[in-house]
């Protein structure tokens, strides 16, 4: 069977958080089964996706003993609410947790998997490119850019975001990074991973966290809410 059992986690005010969990053991092929393979590489869906942790944006260290993945859209309200929860949880756990941050624009301009007629966000592709370009140009400034981009209720206008990115990494460095083909490849990888999750979990909702064998879909309440999931599915005490 390819049905994915959805089990409720701790109560969410919106009642929308769920975890798409494997319905049986051993872990079936439709589970993300995210696990570290060798130093600094995360395998997802049986290495269909293989993330080199030194080469993707992260909160925390690429050498962390446990790694989860956050698929987010800068325009997504719940994604924006999740960011400080991720930052605080990683701060508490230190080198026991790394979080891969993959911008996943729900925008048909750069996401070929958005169904025709589905509501999309405007400028999400531009925001994703800017975030990845900042990370490419100067990784040390990436957390500052993310915190600034995600701290308000809505994202800043694209020209403001670009101006701030230029201020952090330099205008010519930013422009050079924006022309790097890696950015488009990275966006397409995130979109493809989201589509695979969507097939496995039966839902497109964002944000999506890949935590070992499961996919958490939708908002979380607090760092403690995330810590419950990390203990349950990764054994982090």
Image (cartoon, grey):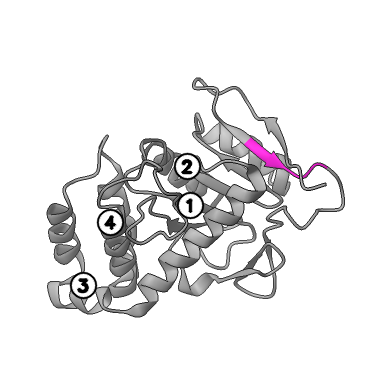
For the residues labelled 2 and 4, the Cα–Cα distance comes to: 16 Å
Q: Earlier in the sequence, mark 1 or mark 3?
A: 1
Q: In which image quadrant can residue 98 be found?
A: bottom right
Which of the two discs, 3 and 4, sits closer to the camera? 4
Give how far across and how far down residue 104 sits, in percent.
Answer: 42, 55
Which residue was labeled with disc 4? 127
**Residue nearest the viewer, comparing 96 with 26:** 26
Over which residues does the magenta segment extend?
19-23
For the residues labelled 3 and 2, the Cα–Cα distance comes to: 28 Å
For the residues labelled 2 and 1, the Cα–Cα distance comes to: 7 Å
Label annotation for residue 174 = 3
Which residue was labeled with disc 1? 71
Which residue was labeled with disc 2? 206
Q: Earlier in the sequence, mark 2 or mark 1?
A: 1
Classify mark 4: residues with Cα within 10 Å, few (<14), some (14-19) or many (20+).
many
For the residues labelled 3 and 4, the Cα–Cα distance comes to: 13 Å
**Residue nearest the viewer, comparing 37 with 45:** 45
């Amino acid at each position: 069977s390819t049905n994915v059992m959805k089990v409720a986690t701790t109560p969410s005010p919106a009642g929308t958080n769920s975890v798409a969990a494997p319905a049986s053991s051993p872990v079936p092929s439709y589970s993300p089964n995210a696990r570290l393979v060798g130093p600094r590489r995360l395998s997802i869906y049986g290495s269909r996706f293989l993330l080199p942790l030194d080469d993707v944006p992260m909160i925390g260290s690429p050498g962390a003993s446990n790694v989860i993945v956050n698929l987010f859209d800068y325009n997504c309200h719940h994604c924006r609410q999740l960011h400080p929860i991720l930052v605080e949880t990683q701060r508490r756990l230190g080198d026991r947790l790394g979080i891969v941050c993959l911008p996943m624009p729900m925008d048909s301009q750069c996401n070929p998997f958005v169904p025709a007629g589905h509501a999309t966000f405007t400028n999400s592709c531009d925001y994703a490119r800017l975030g990845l370009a900042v990370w490419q140009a100067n990784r040390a400034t990436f957390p500052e850019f993310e915190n600034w981009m995600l701290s308000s209720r809505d994202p800043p206008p694209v020209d403001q975001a670009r101006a701030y990115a230029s201020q952090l990494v330099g205008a010519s460095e930013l422009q050079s990074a924006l022309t790097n083909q890696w950015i488009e490849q990275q966006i397409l990888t995130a979109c493809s991973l989201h589509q695979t999750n969507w097939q496995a979990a039966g839902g497109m909702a964002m944000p999506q966290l890949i935590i070992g064998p499961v996919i958490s879909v939708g908002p979380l309440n607090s760092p403690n809410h995330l810590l419950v999931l990390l203990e349950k599915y990764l054994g982090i005490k």
